[in-house]
């Protein structure tokens, strides 16, 4: 395509967003039925999502199926039914699926149908061509074992068909052999407007939750709009516990033993907090860490002993020894916490070993010791070999107490933290860089705040193929689950023995359960215990892989693989091959790792028009025989282009500026070379606006302290090629994609990307280079400049701290903005600064984060939020 023609097309699309003219959506796809059915039996949940969709056009079109499932779940079944023919996904070993993977990538198709989205969900997405006036049924099943935390099990169900549905139903049935003690329904979909759409029914051992909203109700919840439901239904519950020895369930040759005693005295704990205060923890991370620690200290019991260690390239101790959590000690510790500031490099090895030594120097009989490490980065000074650090820490701890590793943000080396924590009887948990990070930290501590038993060993007679039976600690509100196979199906009883330490004394729980008396499973779920055992076994084997060495590692891997294939689980060792009706079309679904960035195929392809996430959508596509002929709304050139800065999804009638394709209302992708996000006060969805390069932009200016930041946008491409800082007329800093240059009246400094943990501090200006960003302090302004290297490198700035009482100008001068969504309007309407604006829905990449997550926002005209035209924010010189 002629490049000038392409510019005209993109300009036309940009004008749509910039003017936000009212649009009228036409539904060419009808999601006429959307059902979610979830059955929970003894904590094991099997959930099936069924979406039935009709093509209302008189020609073929692509219909998209996109749903979100819990991260801990394994997909076990996927099926598409078209014209009475079923197309089933098949789980294969990754290596076997590699050929389909490669073929899919080379055709520009998605080769990663599942990706992580947010903290708790993964997204499954596929599409299929459906003939004129035909229908398709999508059916996805996933399975998960619900984990008890803080005394509750949580079943999370996400629903966002993104259009109103005539036949919308969520049905949940929970069956627990011992009875259900507590049941609550929460989440976005349980708001006031939808209360009467939710019905709960309780019996002795069963509970039913149904959610049947009318079409009118589907537009009225807090997270809904005229396009229908968009949110979560969260069902929390707990069970009755009659037997202190635990409850046993047997079915079809498999058993489940649950152990969660409540009649046990709490054990005083010795806890040491090891806090990273390196330069990368600057700004909000450090502030939230301080806030969380202050709250956690308030929650310590007086018979607890605690210590505080902060570290960068050196180690700082609050006190050399563990001190009792008295009022006086806690106040002194809080004063220490308030003084913690970011600086320097990251010596994880020395810090953790100091924490181990602190506990070892002050052993206390009858207590439980815990180490908690919080860090956001890799070791960069001292011992930096990760395998040596893991070995040093394991040798020092010697299995005497657990190490919990909390990884702050997406840039942290989570694999390293996982290996170090699992090797020391702990777990790794990601703390998401968000406004509630302090609550995430406090929530984790709440889970380990009340130890009840230590050194727990569970023994059984007459069983085999057991899941994990040894546990370092049992905390109040949690649960120990063990599953296995009955060796002899004719056995009449199963004997259990649990040995543990309670406040320094050995305790023993023994029980003999008659197998025939404990079977309590409905016929349609008779194999659930077998699948539960397989799920738990695979999960634990995959965790152990990071610790094992050959040949044990290969044996464990093969066992996990064989079980994944037998039970058709999509795990990190398997892939689901999704075959489409068109000849030679197949997609491959791989389960993402924790914190993994969305998959980007090595061979980029022209982007295809798609619909809103969470349901069914479409692009216009015609077919001649087996050959696909694209007539999508926007004609993209055959050559590849860089990944766009933002992807806007909206139903818009495109004015035929250039007659290239049929002009009909459809769902399109709008690609903007620049996009800025503005967090909104008391609103979950931020505002965003786009700009077309090239520009030299005034990003931030504060005349009161003679500070300014300007950026030059890239052409072609997106992001910034260089960003300039000026302070007090004499200090000048230029950041580009290769170097950082500083000069004043007397000296020059040149630093380079890749020279991590280097920098300088002089005359009120400080610079620190990290692996993917440079942190800059000028006066009371703290700014990060991130470098994104996926393709042609570019820069993106983030203002971490504004001075109190400042009134800066520039595009980044607004730290937050307020808007109000006007209800009752036929089209989405926002009230911004007393003006009504009709926005478009947008998905935009947030390049202020290294991982560049996709953020849903309202796209509005530049003038609506900046109170001026673009010419008011341009400069002639950087």
Image (cartoon, grey):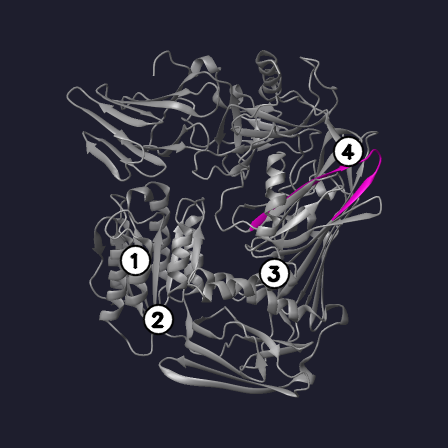
Instruction: Say which label, 4 or 3, has the lower sequence index.
Output: 3
The image shows residue 209 at horizontal and vertical percentages of: 70, 59
Q: Quick one: 765 or 646, which is closer to the camera?
A: 646
Residue 523 versus residue 618 in the image, above or below:
below
Q: CA distance from mark 4 to mark 3?
A: 34 Å
Q: Is residue 774 left or right of residue 615?
A: left
Q: What is the secondary structure assignment of the residue under circle 4? A: loop
Q: Which sits earlier in the primary sequence, circle 3 or circle 2?
A: 2
Badge 1 element: helix
Magenta-colored span = 121-138
Of marks 1 and 4, which one's residue comes earlier in the chain? 1
Disc 3: which residue? 564
Measured as percent of width and height from the top left, residue 303 is found at: 32, 72
SS for callout 3:
helix
Q: Is residue 416 above or below residue 12?
A: below
Q: Which mark is residue 388?
A: 1
Q: Position of residue 609 (x, y in %)?
A: 66, 30
Front residue of this view, candidates 507 and 328: 507
């Amino acid at each position: 395509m002629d490049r000038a023609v392409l510019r005209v097309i993109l300009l036309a699309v940009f004008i749509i967003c910039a003017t936000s003219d009212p649009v009228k959506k036409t539904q060419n796809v009808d999601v006429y039925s959307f059902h979610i059915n979830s059955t929970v039996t003894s904590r094991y949940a099997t959930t099936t999502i069924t979406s039935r969709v009709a093509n209302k056009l008189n020609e073929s079109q692509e219909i998209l199926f996109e749903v979100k499932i819990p991260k801990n779940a394994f997909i076990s079944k996927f099926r598409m039914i078209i014209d009475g023919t079923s197309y089933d996904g098949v789980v294969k070993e990754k290596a076997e699926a590699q050929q389909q993977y490669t073929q899919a990538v080379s055709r520009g198709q998605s080769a990663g149908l599942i990706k992580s989205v947010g903290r708790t969900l993964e997204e499954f997405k596929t599409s299929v061509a459906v003939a004129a006036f035909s229908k398709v049924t999508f059916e996805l099943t996933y399975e998960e074992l619900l984990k008890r935390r803080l005394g509750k099990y949580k079943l999370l169900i996400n629903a966002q068909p993104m259009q109103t549905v005539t036949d919308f139903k969520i049905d949940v049935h929970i069956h627990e052999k011992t009875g259900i003690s507590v049941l609550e329904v929460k989440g976005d979909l349980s708001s006031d407007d939808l209360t009467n759409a939710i019905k709960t029914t309780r019996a002795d051992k069963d509970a039913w939750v149904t959610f049947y909203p009318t079409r009118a109700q589907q537009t009225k919840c807090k997270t809904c709009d005229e396009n229908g439901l968009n949110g979560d239904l969260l069902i929390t519950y707990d069970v009755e516990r009659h037997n202190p020895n635990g409850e046993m369930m047997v079915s079809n040759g498999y058993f489940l033993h649950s152990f969660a005693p409540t009649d046990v005295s709490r054990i005083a704990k010795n806890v040491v907090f090891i806090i990273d205060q390196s330069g990368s923890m600057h700004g909000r991370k450090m502030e939230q860490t301080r806030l969380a620690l202050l709250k956690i200290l308030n929650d310590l019991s007086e018979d607890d002993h605690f210590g505080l260690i902060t570290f960068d390239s050196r180690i700082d101790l609050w006190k050399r020894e563990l001190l009792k959590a008295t009022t006086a000690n806690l106040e002194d510790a809080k004063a220490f916490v308030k003084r913690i500031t970011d600086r320097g490099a990251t010596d994880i090895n020395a810090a953790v070993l100091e924490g181990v030594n602190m506990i070892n120097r002050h052993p206390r009989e009858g207590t439980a010791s815990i180490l908690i490490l919080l860090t956001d980065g890799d070791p960069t000074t001292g011992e930096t070999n990760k395998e040596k650090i893991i070995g040093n820490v394991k040798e020092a701890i010697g299995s005497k107490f657990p190490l919990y590793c909390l990884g702050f943000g997406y840039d942290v080396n989570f694999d390293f933290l996982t290996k170090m924590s699992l090797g020391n009887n702990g777990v790794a948990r990601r703390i998401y860089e968000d406004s509630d990070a302090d609550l995430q930290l406090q929530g984790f501590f709440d889970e380990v705040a009340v130890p009840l038993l230590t050194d727990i060993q569970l023994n059984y007679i007459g069983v085999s193929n057991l899941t994990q039976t040894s546990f370092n600690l049992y905390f109040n509100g949690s649960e120990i689950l063990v599953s296995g196979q009955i060796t002899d199906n004719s056995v009449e009883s199963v004997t259990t023995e649990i040995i543990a330490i309670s406040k320094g004394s050995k305790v023993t729980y023994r029980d003999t359960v008659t197998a025939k008396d404990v079977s309590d499973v409905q016929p349609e779920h008779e194999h659930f215990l077998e699948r539960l055992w397989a799920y738990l076994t695979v999960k634990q084997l995959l965790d152990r892989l990071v610790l094992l060495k050959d040949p044990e590692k290969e044996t464990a891997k093969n066992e996990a693989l064989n079980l994944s294939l037998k039970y058709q689980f999509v795990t990190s060792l398997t892939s689901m091959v999704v075959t489409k009706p068109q000849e030679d079309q197949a997609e491959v679904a791989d389960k993402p790792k924790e914190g993994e960035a969305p998959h980007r195929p090595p061979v980029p392809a022209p982007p295809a028009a798609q619909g809103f996430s969470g349901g069914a959508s479409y692009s216009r596509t015609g077919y001649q025989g087996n050959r696909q002929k694209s007539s999508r709304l926007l004609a993209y050139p055959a050559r590849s282009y860089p990944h766009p800065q933002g992807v806007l999804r909206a139903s818009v009638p495109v004015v035929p500026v250039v007659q290239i394709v049929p002009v009909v209302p459809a769902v399109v992708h709008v690609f903007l070379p620049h996009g800025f996000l503005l967090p909104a006060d008391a609103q979950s969805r931020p505002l965003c606006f786009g700009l077309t390069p090239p520009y030299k932009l005034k990003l931030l200016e504060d005349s009161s302290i003679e500070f300014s930041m300007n950026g030059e946008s890239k052409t072609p491409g997106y992001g910034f090629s260089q960003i300039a800082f000026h302070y007090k007329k004499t200090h000048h800093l230029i950041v580009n994609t290769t170097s950082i240059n500083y000069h004043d009246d007397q000296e020059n400094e040149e630093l380079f990307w890749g020279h991590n943990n280097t920098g300088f501090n002089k005359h009120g200006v400080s610079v620190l280079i990290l692996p993917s960003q440079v942190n800059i302090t000028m006066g009371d302004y703290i700014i990060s400049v991130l470098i994104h290297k996926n393709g042609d490198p570019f820069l993106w700035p983030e203002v971490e701290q504004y001075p109190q009482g400042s009134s800066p100008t520039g595009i980044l001068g607004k730290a937050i903005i307020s808007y109000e969504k006007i209800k009752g309007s036929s089209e989405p309407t926002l009230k911004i600064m007393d003006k009504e604006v009709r926005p478009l829905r947008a998905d935009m990449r947030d390049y202020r984060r290294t991982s560049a997550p996709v953020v849903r926002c309202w796209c509005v005209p530049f003038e609506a939020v900046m109170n001026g035209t673009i010419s008011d924010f341009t400069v002639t010189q950087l």
